[in-house]
Image (cartoon, rainbow, N blue to C red):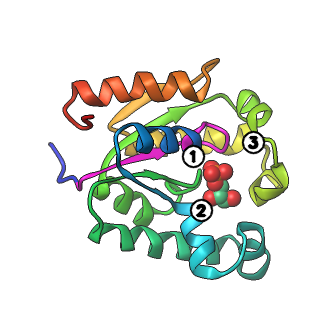
Amino acid sequence: MERERGPHILLIGFMGSGKSTVGRKLARRYHRVLFDTDRGIAEVAGMTIPEIFAAEGEEGFRAREQAYLESLAARDAAIVSCGGGVIVNDRSRELVCGLGTVVYLHVEAREAISRISHPETRPLLNGERSPAELLEERLPLYREAADIMYDTSGKNPGIVSRELGRMLEEKGLLWQ
Ligand code: S3P
């Protein structure tokens, strides 16, 4: 059954899948506002993401993530780059799906890690589970949430944003 969708284009995927860079490029090309959930959460909290994890744990961060997603429902059509774990909590996953068209940017764990230039800014990269384990655990959730799946393996964000932009244009979801 077709689900009811909001007006946004949401990018989801593992850390290092290129969501932020691709989001920035799409927003610029299609003249849309960009919301980056991590940036928004940090702004609202007045803390960096590692500071939030240190002070409030993952649970506190996820609650902030959920509240931030809720605030996007009132906004005009935008590009939204989501944090990599946005699909972990049922409620946040539901919110993501309700906000608009969800694009899953796939990347294998090894390539993802090689793309991350500041691993110290990702608290979960230093957690109990390896990136490969985390990705395996999340893969079904990314797939469940996605309207569109796009494999970024071996592709730079410029190519990804161009191909994805074209795909979204063809579907009538973006226009210049
Ligand atoms: C997280 C990914 C990060 C950030 C936080 C948690 C995750 O975002 O939201 O560190 O659980 O995968 P990026 O995917 O932008 O690195």
Query: Within 8 Å of ligand 1, the CB of disc 1?
Result: yes
Please tell me which of labels 3 and 1 falls first in the chain: 1
Residue found at the very far top of the displayed protein: 154
Within-10-Å neighbours for mark 3: few <14, some 14–19, many 20+? many
The mark lying in front, picked from 3 and 1, is 1
For label 2, the SS is helix
Q: Which residues are magenta?
A: 6-19
- Give the alpha-carbon distance from disc 1 to disc 2, as whole Å: 10 Å
Is 78 covered by the magenta stretch? no
| Number of the label disc, if any, that sits on residue 20 | 1
**Quadrant (top left, top right, bottom left, bottom right) of the N terminus:** top left
Report if the CB atoms under discs 1 and 2 are less than 8 Å apart: yes
Query: Within 8 Å of ligand 1, the CB of disc 3?
Result: no
What's the residue type where badge 2 is placed? Asp
For label 1, the SS is helix
The mark lying in front, picked from 2 and 3, is 2
Q: What residue does disc 3 label?
A: 131
Is 14 covered by the magenta stretch? yes
What's the residue type where badge 1 is placed? Ser
